[in-house]
Image: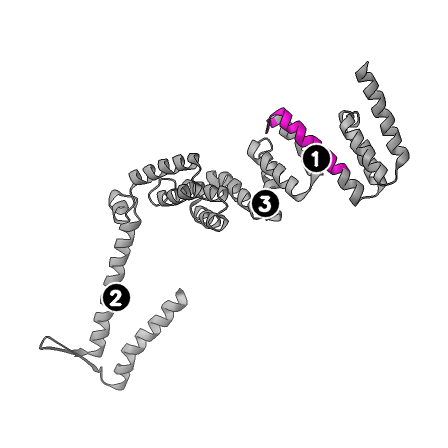
Amino acid sequence: MIRILIIFLVLVGGFFLGPLLQGHQGSAVFEFANYRVSMSFNSFMILELIGLLCLYLIYCIFNKIFNSKTTLGNWLRLKSPKKSIKRLEQAQFLLLEGDYQQAAKLFTKSAKGAKNTTLSYLLAAQAQIDNDELIQANQSLEQAARTCQPKEIFAFQLVQIRLQLKNHEYTAARIVLEQLLNEKPRNVEVLRLADQLYYETGDYQAVIDLLPAMYKAKAYNESQLDQFKQVAYIARIKQLSTDCDTQTLTKWWHAQPRAILNNMTYQKAMATYLNQIGQNSEAEKLLKSINKLEQKERT
């Protein structure tokens, strides 16, 4: 900006000094409606600069009026808080009715006159994510980022993570999620999103490590969590049996809590995969343990 100003001043100085150094100021003649106006070139330049300065001042005044949050400013920008509130209400009803596309449009329109622009854009982005309009959701998030306040960052991050999961941007989502897990370890939505990320990326050990916090926070009801736990443990046993050596699998198994070691479902899964990798003796030990438990239950 300073360089442009210096160049402009040099050019203006050249216009003034050039004619003076040559001994004459030149002339500028204008004819309009049978009138003839003549003046020196320097006088013309001075008038032109004054005119540009006046235009700039008028622009600054109107810019302040248009960008002000007064009634006049809102009216000039065609922004009405009342219209914004109505659009926000209509959009919420459409969201409940499942019309995500129209709801997103109204959320975006409501942002023009809303007291909280960030909220309107975040609601629009969430509706677009739910409707798989991922490009539009990214645009809404960019708009929300421009006005996002410190107290709104957490909500912004959650919507951003949902979009990243939809786009399979797992690395970026994981960075933010792990930060949030440190800051808000008992937040239900953070735990759910982390659980979704770990399942989608096949990180079943991370799911297992997350389960105690999910139980404490009651992220889902207990029966659902028990199902997730079973899926995660069986998937982890299979993963270790195919990706690692036998010692790694058995070491991991013996490091598990007693409740897991004594669970017949996990014992059967472990025995099955031990047989598949040729560890028949270890598998037989587990099968004997399973038979004993079954006999105790019968008696």
Disc 1 is placed on an element classified as: helix
User: What's the residue type where badge 1 is placed?
Assistant: Ala
User: What's the residue type where badge 3 is placed?
Assistant: Ala
Residue 239 vertical position relative to residue 40 in the rendered view, above or below: above
Image quadrant where one finds the N terminus: bottom left
Q: Quadrant of residue 181?
A: top right
Which residue does the image show at 48% across and 43% down from the upper left?
131
User: What's the residue type where badge 2 is placed?
Assistant: Leu
Q: From the viewer's side, name the closer residue of 37 and 5.
A: 37
User: Residue 232, labelled with which disc?
Assistant: 1
Image quadrant where one finds the C terminus: top right
- Tell me which numbered mark, 2 or 1, is placed earlier along the sequence: 2
Instruction: Quickly name the residue at label 3.
Output: 173
What segment is highlighted magenta in the picture?
217-237
Q: Given this view, does label 2 or label 1 mark the residue nearer the observer? A: 1
Locate residue 170, reporting x and y percent.
61, 47
Q: Is residue 213 visible?
A: yes
- Tell me which numbered mark, 3 or 1, is placed earlier along the sequence: 3
What distance separates the C-alpha of mark 3 from that of mark 2? 51 Å
Instruction: Quickly name the residue at label 2.
Output: 52
Q: Main secondary structure of the magenta part?
A: helix
